[in-house]
Amino acid sequence: MCKYCSRCRDQFEIIRAGSCHEELHGKELDDSRGLSNDGRERLKKFFKNHLTGAP
Amino acid sequence: MSARKSDAANIDNPETWVDEYGDFLYRFALSRIKDPSIAEDLVQETFLAALRARENFKGRSAGRTWLIAILKHKIVDYIRKKIREPSSDNIETLSDLADSDFNDHGEWQIRPFKWAINPGKIYEQKEFLDVLYRCLAELPERLAKAFMLREMDGLSTEEVCKVLDITATNSWVMLYRARMSLRRCLESNWLSAGQ
């Protein structure tokens, strides 16, 4: 394989790594951040309404 | 109960999703989008899409992985809409870039650079990941879809063909074009910005 084709293959591997593993992404995440209380309540309400068929 | 079974059980109980997966999905969205309220909206859209597609969850991957894959599609959709807005920061678009990577003699027109990234430590490359998502959003929609189904969702070629209603040959061509377009976009927008 030519030098540049080999580089291209390595680039594909890096792109694939950046795309596929949430565990890898997970390591860059800030554990101190989470849903706001309002956001959590909104989501729970959304679920409740959705699952019970309420408007 | 094994972790996989427990996770599958969680997916069977949407009432638990907010507590089980909400924070992780939110952090993931926030790491790409930066705007807390939009990140929350994307988490809600992800849960809604997951509710609708729940029967397709076959337990082949962890529930969290399945939800993250859906969220990634939502993030790319959001960025795609945003970069179509006139006020959006410009990224050098794929259509601006040379169409062919090779000249008439089959030689590289623009030789690929060596990217100083260890794929196993890709999470350290925040700027790279930001540009990758923006480049994904710049791909023609079907190319992006083919790439994301294959690489983010982990579907087999056969499954990708079924979802997109294309032949295996078409899928390979589309995936090749998507990868080549992404590498060109990254070289133009990430590498040139100073990796």
Image (tube, coloured by chain):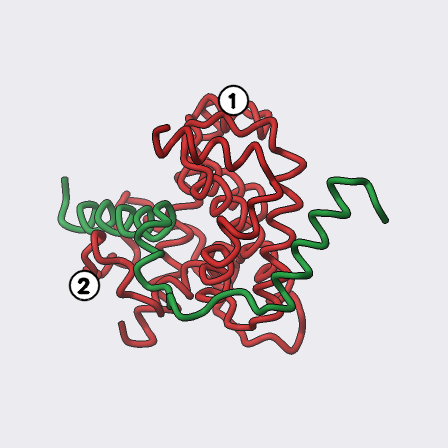
**Chain under callout 2:** B
Q: Which callout, 1 or 2, points at the residue further toward the start of the chain? A: 2
Which residue appears at 42% of the width and 52% of the height? B181
Q: Secondary structure beneath disc 2?
A: loop
The residue most toward the right is A55
Find disc 2 in the rendering and name its residue: B116
Find disc 1 in the rendering and name its residue: B167
Image quarter hosting the C terminus of chain B: bottom left
Residue type at mark 1: give it. Answer: Thr
- Asked if marks 1 and 2 fall on the same chain, the answer is yes
Q: Nearer the viewer, residue B78 or B24?
A: B24
Q: Percent from the top left, x then y, of residue B172?
A: 42, 31
Left or right, B8 with reference to B80: left
Q: Percent from the top left, x then y, of residue B56?
A: 57, 27
The green one among the chains is A
Which residue appears at 19% of the width and 60% of the height? B114
Q: Percent from the top left, x then y, of residue A12?
A: 29, 47
**Chain under callout 1:** B
Circle number at residue B6: none
Q: Nearer the viewer, residue A6 or B161?
A: B161
Q: How many marks?
A: 2
The red one among the chains is B
Q: Residues within 10 Å of mark 2 (few under 14, many from 20)?
A: few
Image quarter hosting the N terminus of chain B: top left
Q: Nearer the viewer, residue B148 or B11?
A: B11
Q: Residues within 10 Å of mark 1 (few under 14, many from 20)?
A: some
**Vertical order, B28 against B172 (above or below):** below
